[in-house]
């Protein structure tokens, strides 16, 4: 077993979670064994806290958590940890909403910490994208918002998605970071400039006094690019996008093949994982 202490940062969807949104038995035991061996484990996700809390609790984590791709970093069990919240400026958000309305987008949603505001009430949209949040209000989103939003989620018409993304980059490039989701929904996620998972992780490396070169980071999508690029050990899942695989130091098996467990078992020498997982399975 290695004597080095690592901070293990793990994305949720497509990484720690299988396609059915559960944690496999082998991955669960790998993470628990890593914690038992003295390493730190943290979730780094684009999800809000309400949609990552169940996994945090299932794993029994006691670490800070990176939500909204780094726009919100807090410690659920330690009020002494300095919460980082870097939302979009309200005026910038309203201008983006105006631009999106010109493009007649399908819908827009804003999150203010854990409160959800929806432009057009749509139950299917809520089920797919609100991630357990009940809208605090819905209607003209620009008017509804009275506080700086943590993030905006835009659902454009497919034939306008690329054009809208390019326009937002041109008009607001100094103020925002945006991420695109692939098919079938082509969503655009917008947060304040300078926010990404790597910046979020810096708050954790400082908290634990663990250097970035001792960070093992797992991911699968473009919102993991900075995190995997800056971590000492950036690990792309087998199901990751090509850009992330090119950025990563290593590629492990997919989220459906216990990729995290396989990598941690080898890297950290956690040889009891397979036997425990097999007994539980």
Image (spheres, rainbow, N blue to C red):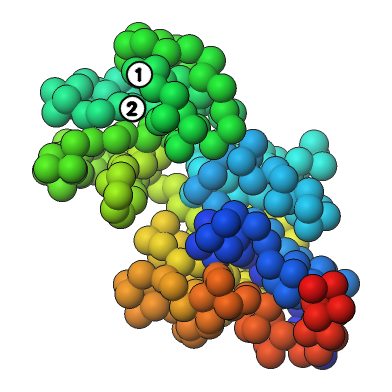
Q: Which residue is mark 1?
A: 119
- Asked which secondary structure carries label 1, the reply is loop
Against 156, residue 207 (above or below) is below
Q: Which residue is mark 2?
A: 108
- Quarter residue 145 falls in: top left
Q: Residues within 10 Å of mark 1 (few under 14, many from 20)?
A: many
212 displayed left or right of 188: right
| Label 1 with label 2: CB-CB less than 8 Å | yes
- Identified at 46% across, 78% down, the residue is 238
267 displayed left or right of 18: right
Against 101, residue 44 (above or below) is below
47 displayed left or right of 124: right
Query: Residue 111 at x, y = what percent?
Result: 48, 28
Closer to the camera in the image, 243 or 71: 243
Residue 156 seen in the current view:
yes
- Identified at 14% across, 28% down, the residue is 103
- Quarter residue 123 falls in: top left
Query: Residue 255 at x, y = what percent?
Result: 55, 70
- Identified at 30% across, 54% down, the residue is 182
């Amino acid at each position: 077993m290695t004597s080095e202490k690592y901070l293990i940062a793990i994305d949720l969807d497509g990484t720690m979670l299988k396609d059915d949104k559960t944690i496999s038995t082998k991955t669960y035991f790998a993470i628990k064994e890593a914690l038992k061996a003295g390493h730190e484990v943290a979730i780094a996700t684009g999800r809000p806290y309400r949609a990552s809390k169940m996994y945090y609790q299932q794993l029994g984590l006691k670490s800070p958590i990176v939500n909204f791709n780094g726009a919100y970093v807090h410690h659920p069990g330690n009020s002494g940890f300095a919460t980082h919240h870097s939302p979009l400026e309200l005026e910038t958000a309203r201008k983006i909403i105006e631009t999106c309305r010109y493009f007649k987008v399908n819908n827009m949603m804003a999150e203010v910490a854990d409160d959800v505001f929806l432009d057009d009430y749509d139950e299917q949209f809520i089920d797919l994208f609100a991630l357990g949040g009940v809208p605090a209000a819905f209607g003209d989103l620009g008017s509804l918002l009275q506080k700086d939003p943590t993030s905006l989620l835009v659902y454009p018409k497919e034939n306008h998605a690329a054009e809208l993304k390019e326009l937002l980059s041109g008009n607001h490039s100094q103020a925002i970071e945006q991420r695109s989701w692939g098919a079938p929904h082509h969503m655009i996620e917008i947060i304040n400039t300078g926010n990404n998972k790597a910046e979020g992780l810096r708050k954790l490396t400082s908290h634990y006094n663990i250097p970035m070169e001792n960070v093992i980071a797992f991911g699968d999508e473009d919102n993991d690019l900075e995190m995997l690029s800056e971590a000492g050990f950036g690990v792309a899942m087998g199901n990751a996008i090509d850009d992330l695989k090119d950025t990563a130091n290593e590629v492990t098996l997919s989220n459906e093949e216990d990729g995290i467990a396989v990598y941690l078992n080898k890297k950290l020498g956690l040889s009891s994982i397979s036997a425990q997982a097999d007994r539980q399975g």
